Image: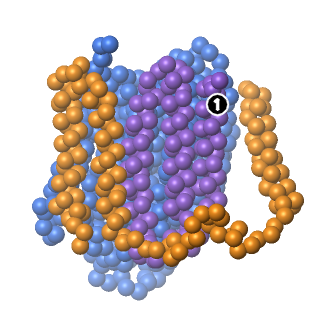
Chain colours: A orange, B purple, C blue
Amino acid sequence: MPIDYLPILVMVVVVVAFAAIALTLSSLTGPRHPTAAKLEPYESGMPPFGSARRRISIKYYLTAVLFILFDIEIIFFYPWAVLFRQLKLFGLVEMGVFVLILLIGYVYVWRKGGFNWD
Amino acid sequence: MLTVNHFILLSAILFCLGAVGVLIRRNPLVMFMSIELMLNAANLAFVAFSRYLNNLDGQIFVFLILTVAAAEVAVGLAIIVAMFRARENVDVDEVNELKG
Amino acid sequence: MPILVPDINLRIIAPALIVTVTAIVVLLGELVTPAERKRWLGYLSIAGLVVAAFAAFSLWGANASGFSGMVVADNFGLFLTLTIALSAALSILLSIPFIHAHEIDQGEYYVLLLASVAGMIVMATATDLIVIFLGLELLSLPLYILAAFQREDTRSLEAGIKYFLLGAFSSAFFLYGIALVFGATGTTNLAKIAASLAQSAGSPMLSIGVGLLMVGFAFKVALVPFHWWTPDVYDGAPTTVTAFMSVAVKAAAFGAFFRTFQFALPALALDWRAVAAVLAVLTMTLGNVAALLQSNVKRMLAYSSIAHAGYILIALVAMSANGLSSALFYLLAYTVTNLGAFGAVIALSDGARERLEIKDFAGAAREHPLVALALTICLLSLAGFPPFAGFVGKFLIFGAAVETGWAWLAVIGVLNSLVSVYFYLRPVVQMYMSEPAEGWSGIRVAPLVALALLIAVISVIALGVFPAPAIALAAGGLIR
């Protein structure tokens, strides 16, 4: 029934109105006295030195992504390890298939030179 | 006392923040981080519902979603890096050869 | 506490499994294949798809479900599996010469395509929202890379970035929708959701969840107003990838769309049918009107694919057995027709230089009469002229809508088809009526492209002239 959606409509209106009012009010009423200290990224921290936009070698990206990909697979080992005894042979075979597929990915990356820094 | 409602409200707020971030930010990396925020809002909702319903399925889904998110990171960053190499610029407002 | 080992039934996921194994074998093959033999990886991929299609065919009528009710091998899913395998095989036939001409012939191309196919099959046969989500991601992630596969071409990279950001954005909506539905019903299994909703009334949370699911599906099948990524992505991606995703993604995503809404959410039909009807009208109208304004064939076909998504959505609104089978038939017809059209566009390209502006087609009929004829047949079929496949598909869908009391929707669909005739005929007029443009001499159509084109055109005509067997097959394709 369309009337059932009335609460949703009300919520949408309230949310939009709240955001609009909050932004407008603060920009109208708030005082602005920018000083050098206030404009610093960390007002009460260390004085920044050097450029924050220093380039890190793009090669690092590949290493990082490969790490994330293989690292996240560990997550599936936790529940498996907890239940290993109850799952018996079935669990072993399933994990073997899982690791085999990961291993194929590893071999692919290795042969393609994904682990070479230069 | 914290109830499931608090968690769902928090996750809804995170989800909306992520969605707004995707819509108003113009750097693909920041847009992508916002998308990750949306996915993790869903994760939070799954865990909260799982606890509330006494149903472990929700927690298992989080594992799957985390893996999917990691694969998404790899693919997304690879494309963004390739774009950066080709153009030295990744601002989506300047990525506009395709129009019509 | 005893552990319940889920019922592992590898037979019912055999098609997806075969495609996955093929992908892995091709990946390893890439490591040992010298550069000049890469095309063999393409042939190997096609062989894997053929075996997967046979596996799907052998399961016909099995109606078995497995993995704790998460996957099903019903005729609906199998019909879609066959459609997807066909579209992938034809796309690879087109791709082998294409990626060679564009100097991107790497085995990874086929691996990604096959991985995407595996995801599509999973999505089309899944009966659990989480498995649908996994299928969706498995089909999407490789496509993001494929869209950006021409790494030297910033247009291709731009298509990849746009597709990735918007695709991931829509996946997040879809996932949050699943979370809310899970919270409201306590399950993500489609059958259990239906059972739970049959007993208790809905809640606002459920409504929001269902709305988010719809947004996710609408993004994937490119329904207005969630379509704006489509023209840019289809335009920038390599043409063979565009051809593949314009048909196969629709088959998989519409499969899950129908399953979720018609099968799991009939209790909320009053609400979502009205929304879907509005989306269908917007999608058809905007797709066709925008296609009128395009001068580039790829963009025109992109908007045309949006319009076709609108027609198929009518079948969902009808929410009947006939609607379901008409959608299956339409998806098959659209697959062969659109691949034929893209195949002809690829056949007319000159090595790595593609002719994508409609005015470039001037005089093609004189230089390449057969390719021009094939393109004409496919465009007429897309426009819905008899005796081609597209006509039968539209006839069935509009018939299903009239039957269930949505005649006004069918009327809007027919009016839209009439509008679409204009832009589909523009390339035809250019090919037959204009003087030949420069540079036609010396273009030879690659044999594999010719073969794919031949298969597509024969299917378009066969489905149009003798539609009965395919209709019977689709009619048997009901959801279990």
**Seen from this angle, which residue lies furthest bottom?**
C438
Nearer to us in this view, A42 or C142: A42
Q: How many marks?
A: 1
Occupied quadrant, residue B93: bottom right
Question: Residue at image x 22%, y 21%?
Answer: A85
Q: Position of residue C163 (x, y in %)?
A: 48, 58
Q: Is C225 positioned to the left or the right of B73 in the image?
A: right
Residue type beneath disc 1: His
The 10 Å Cα crowd at callout 1, few under 14, some 14 to 19, many 20 or more, is: few
Q: Is residue A83 visible?
A: yes
Q: Is C187 positioned to the left or the right of C134 in the image?
A: right
* Quadrant position of the C terminus of chain C in the picture: top left
Residue C236 versus residue C83 in the image, above or below: below
Q: Is C477 positioned to the left or the right of C451 in the image?
A: right
**Disc 1 sits on a residue from what chain?**
B
Q: Helix, strand or loop at disc 1?
A: helix
Question: Residue at image x 79%, y 42%?
Answer: A13
Nearer to us in this view, B47 or C42: B47
- The residue to which callout 1 is attached is B6
Occupied quadrant, residue C467: top left
Nearer to us in this view, C339 or A41: A41
Question: Residue at image x 58%, y 70%?
Answer: A47
Residue B17 versus residue C77 in the image, above or below: below
